[in-house]
């Protein structure tokens, strides 16, 4: 009995054995190897391309192993903040213009200037593309692709009703008139011209820039006043009244992603989005989609769009292998074979040699995206000041304010005033 | 089975011979502290309880007095978070309103529904275990993401419910995305998960003394009188238990609102549960300190409500002793 029963001695023995196992050094083969962790947001297509490039890099660099972690946009930043708190960030991190200032100024990211010309080859980058990743004069992010805001629309539906697709330069009112005509021509319940994008921050930013104002000032203050807001929300109230866009209770189902967008659900023909998302939208739509610039200001000369550094690689300040990570970063943005695998899924490559090399191998969507960026390049404005902390909450406030008006709970003027009050308090709080 | 055990333990013995060298000493200690083995068995749970429950709870109590955005270090701000919640945050007022409305509607409806179904099942119908299992099923599935997504589809403008209504010539609104009705879809989802209070009611009904009903029938009491004068008073302890449990649950409800509104609490904050607002502050805007303060106030609110329930218990709960 004494030898067979489960007693404390054996439990302790088991625990001791487990402890010994846990304390064992890692497998001999892994010793001396360099491990790089990469982390990015996006859908499966992006994961496939990124993992492929990681594998190619490992094949070319024995002794380096790369692991990849990926999440959707919403959860991505939550996990990133959690990992930053645990001093456990991945080595190579996909970064966005809206967050890079926060992370760089809190010293969570590594300045990359020292690597340039050594591990990091940026010789093919235009200076403006490099500047997009700078914070306080130092490089903290390197562009993985240029893109911009764009209308995404269902070209077949426009053709079907013999309507001219949106084109540059047309004013916001002209777009509204066309969309009302489309709703009328389609003449079926549950179908409208475009999404109600009165709650879309990026659309508002472009519209406001065409009035000569930035959404955020260099000091981090909200750049619009109550009159601007009343005009913006008033524009969308008019759109709803004349039947140009989705009704509020249909728009309210939009979770601001591709899957729940009115175009993807077959409820409308046009939406306000980003140029690189043409690929994602087309994957969910049987009908042929196309992209066009946002409407122009009243003078038809000014576009509020800009080339967004929305997809960058950064290196964590806590990285134990910064040189290797910089080398991998360089491979992603400057190697032609890697460029061919990545295509234009994150946008148009910033490196001119890579862009030229991949142009012939692009599919139709890729060519359309590249042509779009080329077309807008001489029409866009300079990069606006970065959004301050609290900007994410302002975006949510825009959605809510637009709904408040849409559902008839408040007049445009009152809602605009309340928006300003809440917006100021959000920005002041940070 | 026994043989299997023996084989495994032998392997353990072989792998750690050093332990076996001090048998005398262990036996002495065992007599002095007989509970050590018990604590060892409890260790996984204890580690989880202190490491994953008590530890983080105490940490959040500390964080509730700080500004903390995860990236930088927490900065002590005293009671500032609590002061702001109490005096300067209109979204707190909105979310408290939504949450109280939800609790006040969903708990009585759910309990009433559960009691009604339990009484029907208690009539001794055929296949009772099957019905019981079927009715319990929503409670197992109810808090899941899949059901919340399904709910969104059922109650959308072109959803299942409106298709059914259309057969009767009624054109329904888009229930989930209309600020006037969105909260009711969440209440309906909660009531639909009546299984767990139903099972408890059923157990209570089973124990009702038959002789009371016989005596009442002889005296000419109608079924309705029997229900109000006998069933309900005797069931009050069960009702009380269900009420307390369901109220606490309702205060903590999160997943359905999160999925159905896409995390926004919209349209126009009409489904902004307190828990959802707390989540937004913590994980949407990285105000961990503020969110911790919100969480502790929720704990206090639940404690207060439960305390009130227990204080008022003697006014209406009938214990038969």
Image: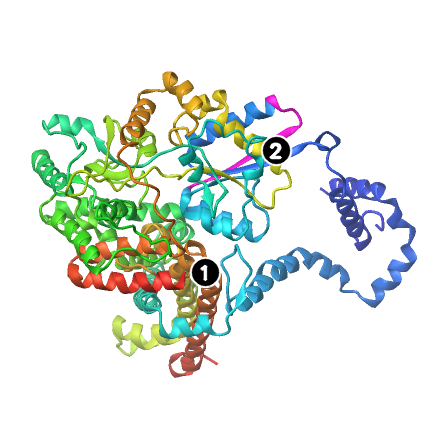
For mark 1, give the secondary structure: loop
Q: Looking at the image, which residue is at 40% across and 36% down?
A: A128
Percent of width and height locating residue A348: 38, 29
* Residue at the spot of label 2: A324
Specify whether residue B307 is in view.
Answer: yes
Image quarter of residue A371: top left
Front one among A137 and B168: A137
Percent of width and height locating residue B290: 45, 65
Percent of width and height locating residue B153: 28, 45
Specify whether residue B133 is in view.
Answer: no
Label 1 crowd bin: few (<14), some (14–19), many (20+), radius 10 Å: many
In the rendered image, residue B7 lying in the magenta stretch gets the answer: no
Q: Nearer the viewer, mark 2 or mark 1?
A: 2
- On residue B287, which mark appears? 1
Give the alpha-carbon distance from disc 2 to disc 1, as whole Å.
34 Å
In the rendered image, residue A71 lying in the magenta stretch gets the answer: yes
The residue range painted magenta reads: A60-72
């Amino acid at each position: 009995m004494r030898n067979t029963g489960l007693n404390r001695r054996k439990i302790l023995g088991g625990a001791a054995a487990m402890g010994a196992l846990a304390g064992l050094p890692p497998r001999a083969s892994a010793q001396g190897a360099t491990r790089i962790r990469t982390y990015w947001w996006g859908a499966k297509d992006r994961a496939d391309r990124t993992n492929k490039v990681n594998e190619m890099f490992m094949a070319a660099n024995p002794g380096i192993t790369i692991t990849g972690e990926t999440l959707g946009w919403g959860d991505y930043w939550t996990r990133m903040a959690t990992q930053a708190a645990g001093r456990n960030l991945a080595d190579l991190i996909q970064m966005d213009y809206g967050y890079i200032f926060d992370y760089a100024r809190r010293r969570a990211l590594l300045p990359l200037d020292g690597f340039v010309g050594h591990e990091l080859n940026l010789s093919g980058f235009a200076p403006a593309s490099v500047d997009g990743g700078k914070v306080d004069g130092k490089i903290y992010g390197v562009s993985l692709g240029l893109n911009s805001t764009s209308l995404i629309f269902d070209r077949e539906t426009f053709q079907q009703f013999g309507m001219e697709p949106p084109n540059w330069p047309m004013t916001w009112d002209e777009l509204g008139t066309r969309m009302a005509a489309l709703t009328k021509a389609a003449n079926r319940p549950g179908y409208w011209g475009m999404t109600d994008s009165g709650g879309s921050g990026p659309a508002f930013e472009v519209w406001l820039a065409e009035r000569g104002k930035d959404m955020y000032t260099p000091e981090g203050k909200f750049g619009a006043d109550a009159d601007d807001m009343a005009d913006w929300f008033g524009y969308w109230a008019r759109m709803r009244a004349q039947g140009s866009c989705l009704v509020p209770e249909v728009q309210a189902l939009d979770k601001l992603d591709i899957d729940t967008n009115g175009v993807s659900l077959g409820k409308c023909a046009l939406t306000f989005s980003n140029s690189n998302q043409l690929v994602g939208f087309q994957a969910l739509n049987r009908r042929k989609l196309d992209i066009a610039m946002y409407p122009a200001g009243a003078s038809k000369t000014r576009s509020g769009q800009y080339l967004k550094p929305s997809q960058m690689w950064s290196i964590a300040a806590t990285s134990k292998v910064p040189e290797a990570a910089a080398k991998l970063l360089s491979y992603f943005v400057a190697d032609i074979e890697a460029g061919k695998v990545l295509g234009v899924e994150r946008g148009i490559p910033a490196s001119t040699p890579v862009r030229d090399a991949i142009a012939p191998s692009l599919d139709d969507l890729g060519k359309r995206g590249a042509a779009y960026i080329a077309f807008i390049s001489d029409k866009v404005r300079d990069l606006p000041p970065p959004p301050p902390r609290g900007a994410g909450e302002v975006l949510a406030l825009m959605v809510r304010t637009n709904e408040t008006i849409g559902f008839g709970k408040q007049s445009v003027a009152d809602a605009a005033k309340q928006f300003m009050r809440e917006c100021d308090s959000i920005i002041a709080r940070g | 089975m026994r043989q299997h055990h023996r084989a495994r333990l032998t392997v353990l013995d072989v792998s750690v011979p050093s332990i076996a060298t001090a048998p005398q000493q262990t036996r002495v200690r065992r007599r002095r502290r007989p509970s050590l083995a018990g604590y060892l068995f409890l260790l996984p749970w204890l580690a989880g309880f202190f490491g994953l429950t008590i530890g983080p709870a105490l940490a959040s109590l500390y964080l509730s007095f700080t500004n903390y955005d995860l990236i930088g270090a927490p900065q002590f701000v005293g009671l500032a978070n609590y002061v702001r919640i109490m005096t300067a945050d209109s979204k707190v007022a909105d979310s408290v309103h939504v949450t109280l409305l939800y609790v006040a509607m969903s708990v009585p409806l759910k309990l009433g529904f559960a009691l009604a179904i339990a009484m029907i099942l208690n009539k001794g119908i055929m296949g009772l275990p099957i019905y019981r299992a079927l009715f319990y099923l929503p409670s197992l599935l109810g808090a899941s993401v899949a059901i919340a997504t399904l709910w969104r589809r059922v109650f959308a403008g072109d959803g299942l419910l409106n298709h059914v209504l259309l057969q009767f010539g009624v054109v329904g609104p888009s229930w989930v995305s209309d600020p006037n009705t969105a909260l009711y879809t969440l209440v309906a989802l909660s009531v639909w998960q009546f299984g767990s209070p139903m099972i408890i009611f059923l157990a209570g009904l089973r124990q009702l003394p038959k002789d009371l009903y016989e005596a009442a029938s002889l005296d000419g009491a109608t079924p309705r009188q029997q229900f109000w004068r006998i069933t309900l008073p005797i069931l009050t302890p069960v009702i009380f238990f269900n009420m307390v449990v369901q109220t606490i649950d309702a205060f903590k409800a999160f997943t359905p609102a999160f999925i159905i509104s896409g995390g926004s609490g919209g349209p126009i904050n009409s489904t902004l549960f307190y828990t959802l607002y707390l989540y937004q502050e913590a994980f949407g805007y990285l105000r961990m300190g503020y969110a911790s303060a919100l969480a502790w106030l929720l704990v206090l609110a639940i404690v207060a409500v439960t305390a009130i329930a227990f204080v008022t218990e003697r006014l209406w709960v009938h214990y038969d002793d």
